[in-house]
Image (cartoon, rainbow, N blue to C red):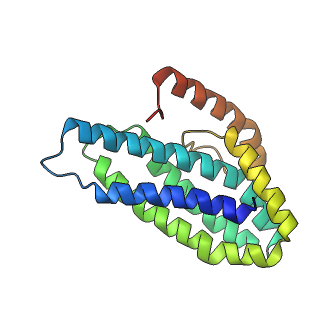
Amino acid sequence: MDAISYLKGDHEEVLAMLARLEQQPVDTTVTPADLEARRALVTDLVIAESRHEAVEEEYFWPTVADSVPGGDQLAAQATEQEQRAKHVLDKLDHCKATDPEFENLIAEIITAGREHISYEEQQVWPAVQQTLSPERLDELGEQLAQAKKNAPTRPHPHTPPKPGVLKTAGAGAAMMDKARDAVTGRGRS
């Protein structure tokens, strides 16, 4: 699968989660089971976003920066958006559904997520598709798919979004994330 199709699948998954979060407003009639389901959906979003952003920062953005005219600026803006989102996702990951800031953080990540996805799809992808060969896009798609299998499941906002750092520190972080997930049962919804 080519890189754009692969990333599009991730975007569709995230957008569906964002839509579900918006469609489930929290009001005074919400039950503890409703809050638990909302918390589980947020956890799934954190996992999906963490894995997606890690592989983009490891493979996609370096390719954009190295191969696409003006790619340095495109990649820099994207990774800046991703770093800001990681801070919000990190707060969300540590928040209980009953915490006062939980809903504000959800609203913030919905806005940031849609903005970032729109930026990628409208600004970056056309330039990538004009520049990279179909063969290179397929190769990149395979790299993304393989890397995602071993990507971190939690945001790591203090890890620099540099490919070399991510390939070494990211692997260790992913192992720790998965071990913690296995012990706690996180992400089994």
Q: Position of residue 30 (x, y in %)?
A: 18, 45
Taking depth in this image into account, of 143 and 77 the one nearest to the observer is 143
Q: Position of residue 5 (x, y in %)?
A: 68, 63
**Position above or below: 92 against 18:** above
Q: Position of residue 80 (x, y in %)?
A: 59, 61
Residue 145 visible in the shown view: yes
Q: How many marks?
A: 0
Q: The C terminus appears in which quarter of the rendering?
A: top left
Question: What residue do we see at 68% from left, 55% from top?
Answer: 56
Taking depth in this image into account, of 139 and 104 the one nearest to the observer is 139
User: In the displayed image of the protein, which residue is found farthest to the left?
Assistant: 28
Question: What residue do we see at 32% from left, 59% from top?
Answer: 22
User: In the displayed image of the protein, which residue is found farthest to the front?
Assistant: 1
Horizontal arrangement in the rendering, residue 49 relative to residue 161 (left or right):
left
User: In the displayed image of the protein, which residue is found farthest to the top?
Assistant: 183
**Position above or below: 77 against 91:** below
Q: Position of residue 11 (x, y in %)?
A: 56, 60
Residue 70 visible in the shown view: no
